[in-house]
Amino acid sequence: MKSRKRVIEDIKETIEGKHPEQALQEALGYVQSIIEMMRDSLLVLDDSLRVISANQSFYDIFLVRPEDIEGKFIYELGNRQWDIPELRKLLEEILSDNTTFEDIEVKQEFPDIGQRVMILNARRIYSAEIKAQRILLAIKDITKRKRAERELATSELQYRRLFETAHEGILIVNAETGQIEDVNPFLLDMVGFSKREILGKKLWEIGMLEHANLSRERFRVLQDRKYIRYEDIPLETKDGRQVDVEFASNVYEVNGKKVVQCNIRDITERKELDRLKDEFIGMVSHELSKPLTVITGCMNTVLDEATNLSEQERTHLLRNAALQADALTHLLGNLLELARVQADRLILHAEPIEAQFVAKSVVERITEQYPTHKYSLNFPPGLPPVDADPVRLERILYNLLDNARKYSPEGSEVRVFAKPDKDNVIIGVSDQGVGIATSDHEKIFGSFERLEHVGFKQTKGIGLGLLVCRRLVEAHGGRIWLESAPDAGSTFFFNLPCKRGA
């Protein structure tokens, strides 16, 4: 758009040296062409606020024709969309007081084009030739600009909410100087620094990341590549602790200014899970290989040395193979149960069962496998049936009995007992072993937990039996707990609901 000074100069050039009447007509034509080319809408009103004319932009934007508006009061146009009290008052003041108004923002709904946000400017023009007042009303449609501003504000609000609530650390850094311009609460909690201690400092000055020279070098690499990522680097907290983090940075532009966004994730838990996974794979591989080795060895010996072995020797080898096969089946069963729980696919086939019969079967089985201990049952007469999955109840009892015999001296007694308790039956497994400190009562129900004791360092297993017991008991709607103390033996209790109507 040309400036007012430039327009005046163009008009002077147009009329210079010409007859006054011709010059006037050419000047008016020049002005009219400028008006028609304007992107903003223009209306010319008479002193009664009737429309004399409009430019092409007004017709295009508001979808009207000259015959729709010329000669009509402005507040009668269309379906009286222009009957805006504030606008009418301002226009009347212009006529009476020879004033102007500038940058008045109004919002109005139009049937054909929807809601429009407009900036209005108006001034009085007096024509001496016809001795009449005119009002020139300029209308600038800022609907798109307002929508863009709202979208930008919404976007900035959403970003700020994400920034403030993100579950990973975020730093915003000046891409030229390396100075930190913003930091989110999660990172402050992670490192223990206050916002005041971090803002305005450079990345290599805050002491969180490795030594300064290396941090400077990495920042120069980032400036060149625009993106860097480190999967595992140490980050030091204010109190000197080391946290392993994943560090990713990228450069982008905001309002013409380049900034760096650094996303910092604490991977301590992930590394611990990776360690546990590796440990689990190693332990399971070891525990699987042992029975398989025994089974293979026994069977090959029987096959290869059949003619040289006595009946008693063959029976002994086959019995060892059967025991190891049973141990392998039990281990795989525990792993499968945990996998089902993890995948939320554990399905119970509950039915009313007499718990003492299941317990008797488990005791007979473990007595045959491990006759090194004495096993006893104590189930009172009239004990109500429980609503349980018999296969899962058998697994719970076997895990508890197997655990009891591992941690109690050979020849000692392992007791299985039960008692009614309101709408439940409480079942217990008690041993005369080394006992468990109170501080470890909850710990032993975790994954891969095996408490080592003097005299029992040879304990086998991968530490999943008690975890399987907890998951299966909880799946039945019960709970499992422990009463124990060092050198006083241990008793594991769990409860199961009675069959309704029992």
Image (spheres, rainbow, N blue to C red):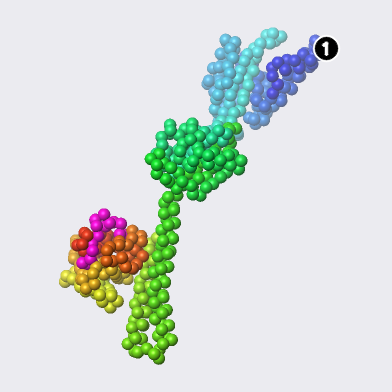
Quadrant into which the N terminus falls: top right
Q: Nearer the viewer, residue 167 or 321?
A: 321
Residue pictured at 52% horizontal, 21% vertical: 85
Question: Residue lying furthest left in this view?
Answer: 381
Quadrant into which the C terminus falls: bottom left
Does residue 58 appear in this view? yes
Looking at the image, residue 417 sits to the left or right of residue 195; the answer is left
Residue pictured at 47% horizontal, 32% vertical: 199
With respect to residue 416, does 228 lie above or below? above
Is residue 73 rendered magenta in the image?
Answer: no
Q: Nearer the viewer, residue 416 or 133?
A: 416
Residue 229 in picture, x, y percent from top left: 54, 46
Residue 344 in picture, x, y percent from top left: 39, 60
Three-letter code for the amino acid on which mark 1 is drawn = Lys
Q: Quadrant of residue 149?
A: top right
Q: Quadrant of residue 297?
A: bottom left
Residue 6 in picture, x, y percent from top left: 72, 17
Q: Nearer the viewer, residue 473 or 304?
A: 304
Residue pictured at 35% horizontal, 89% vertical: 310
Describe the element under mark 1 as helix, strand or loop: loop
Looking at the image, residue 163 sits to the left or right of residue 334; the answer is right
Residue pictured at 71% horizontal, 24% vertical: 36
Q: How many marks?
A: 1
* Residues drawn in magenta: 424-445
With respect to residue 301, does 390 lie above or below? above
Residue 44 in picture, x, y percent from top left: 65, 19
Is residue 444 rendered magenta in the image?
Answer: yes
Looking at the image, residue 440 sits to the left or right of residue 114; the answer is left
- Which residue position is annotated with label 1? 18
With respect to residue 32, does 283 lie above or below? below
Query: Crowding near pointer 1: few (<14 within 10 Å), some, many (20+)?
Result: few
